[in-house]
Amino acid sequence: MIRASRALSVAGGSIGRMTDATPFTWGPFLRDWSGEWSDSLSDDGTHAREDETARRDRRLGFPAAPEERIAALEEHLGRRMPPSYREFLAVSDGWRHAGGFITLLAGTTEARWHNDASGLAAMFEEYLDEDPTPEELRDVAVWRRGLQLDVESDAMSVVLDPGDVDENGEWAVYTWASWRAAPPQRFPDFATFMRDMHREFHRLRARPANGEPEFVNTTTRRLDAQVEEARLWALGGDRERAERALDEAKQYGRPRAAGLGDQIRRLLGRTDLAYEDLAIDPRYAPELLPPLVAEHAAHRHRDDSTLNYRLRGATDDVVTLAHTLLEQVRSGTYRYTAAGPFGEAVERARESARWGDTDGAWRTMLDALPLWQPLGPDHLAPLGWVADPLLGPLLTPERGRALLSTPRGGQPGEPRTAGADRSDPEGLSWLADPDAPGDHTSYRFVLVEGVEPQDLPGRLADEEGAALDEPMTLHEAHMRSLRGRREFSSFDDRALVVVGRAGARWSFAFDGDRPRLAPQRFVSPAAAACADARAVVVWGGLRDGHGNPFFHLSVAKAGAELYAFTYADGEVRRTGPVPPDLDPDRFFTSQEERAGTGAVIRTERALLEAIAGEFGVHLPRHAITWGRLHTFTTRSWTRPPQDGETFSVIRFEWGSN
């Protein structure tokens, strides 16, 4: 017994370190697997006679097949066996308990052509449409041409496919089980398949049931130590190394590996993760429940029983917390908090994001990240903030990588990647980019100097005491504005705008809902918006609802318009002395309308660059497109109808039936 244990210990190291690209020999691999399987069985359990013998002998395999028997099989089948299966047979002529669902795997005596014995080819053929993909056709063919390896199994079919051969002569392995509700699974060769079956065996034994012995062996000890190393690598900013180590351990079902790895994956943009049991651990729930709950809330078709299923095993306090968080997320009132200096930075970041400075908010959080402390040994990074309505939109894949590459939790070191500080371009010209997010083919905005964003409703809205709504996305704001609205006028043009800061001493109110300029009725809000300083109004996109270019700029100060110009219908109309850098004659020519889309966009971009340079302003693309900002509705941008002018009013009346 001592000799057997020593052999397992020495050879067992190789089994854990192997990857699918690592050469290995079958003998040590199969011997170690046999020992692990034998040790996982209870002494007082009832086993089949064959299993009891295999347990006693610590051998899942069979005597090696001599070369003449392998050659006889090949002659019978009319094909030379692929190298890795041939090498396997030369060590063990078949195998018991490959993974959790294959009781007996074929050796030289049992291997035979499948010839659709399972009826799978016919079944998959029924699902083919008129234009099947090569993969769909292959899923039919493998069951007719494949070499059947499953002799006894739990409704799992396994074939080697001679029609799917690589440059080394290896045949791909395909498996399928009805209870997996998935297409056939492909493995590039038999050795890779067996390695995966060994991992499946580990996953199924990783959490022993009552009465079963603890599942501990050389492989599990090595992987558990690797998980702890990966935790420290992750906290130290070595994300890629940690992720590789955790992924390997997860494949073997090692506890902690999935929960730690899911935290990394979430910050890289993956959603719908489980975080293993960490999210329902009272110690970690304040950080890991918010993203889980937010992802549930994002799927509006899901009822809350889905969330309750994910909370199974949680304490009453954790379940109550989850449903409280769900209500807050749905109402937009959730606020992420953290302890210590990092928590203070979070509050400053939220205030910056509230007014559109998402880049500044991100820098604030990233600079404070080394001061962040985990809630326990299985906590790798702050995660609750991704559910915060103002802070969550800060996350991009680049920023997730930057966060994960920053040492934290008391670990020494320097960030391993650039900070991905800036997601917003300078100035205004991004509005002219046809590929920019948000599809702002037309837009309008007001820039006001020397005024805070919260003061804009008092200057641009009709209602006395008008105030800002709570931060929301433009889409949410528009849906909210339409709720319960029953009357629409063709002359009334109130803009639903988001607000924020546009630079030093400038605030903005932006409407990107494809507004259409009506020059003959337009009244610039610039004069009403400004006080002692300046106000700038831009209405552009250079393309109206009919594809015709248009652009408007007006500038006012101290309640009076200084200058303005409007380009529409191929003509420029101007008032006041327009500064040379903004002179429309620099940008528009008589050939403008015939210049094509590319030239129109270049003209628009040049105009926006000139305006940004003249006033030193910018608009935050990330916040406007993806973030949540305060909103309000302005007064109409068009004058009331005059005598003789017609207009229409559409009114919806809802019946009582």
Image: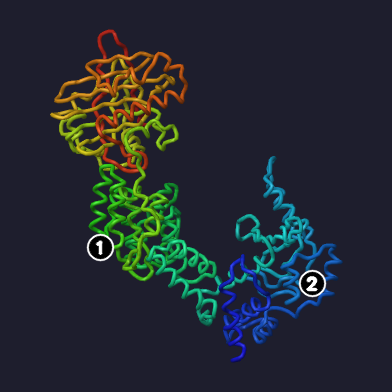
Secondary structure at badge 1 equals loop
Q: Callout 1 environment at 10 Å: few (<14), some (14 to 19), or many (20+)?
A: few
Kindly give the residue lying farthest to the bottom in the view shown: 2
Q: Position of residue 109 (x, y in %)?
A: 80, 72
Q: Quadrant of residue 458?
A: top left
Q: Callout 2 environment at 10 Å: few (<14), some (14 to 19), or many (20+)?
A: many
Mark 2, residue position: 108
Front one among 614 and 318 = 614
Q: Position of residue 187 (x, y in %)?
A: 65, 61
Q: Is residue 151 shown above or below 342?
A: below
Q: Position of residue 248 (x, y in %)?
A: 53, 67
Q: Is mark 2 in CB contact (under 8 Å) with mark 1? A: no
**Mark carried by residue 339:** 1
**Mark carried by residue 228:** none
Colour theme: rainbow
Label 2 sits on what residue type?
Answer: Thr
Front one among 479 and 265 = 265
Label whose residue precedes the other's in the sequence (2 or 1):
2
Label 1 sits on what residue type?
Answer: Ala
Q: Residue at x 37, y 34 (%)?
A: 430
Q: Residue at x 70, y 40 (%)?
A: 130
Q: Kindly tell me whether residue 237 is visible in this rendering.
A: yes
Q: Quadrant of residue 340?
A: bottom left
Q: Residue at x 39, y 31 (%)?
A: 440
Front one among 626 and 429 = 429
Distance Cα–Cα, label 2 vs label 1: 65 Å
Q: Residue at x 35, y 65 (%)?
A: 413
Q: Position of residue 520 (x, y in %)?
A: 30, 14
Question: Is 424 left or right of 117, judged from the image as shown?
Answer: left
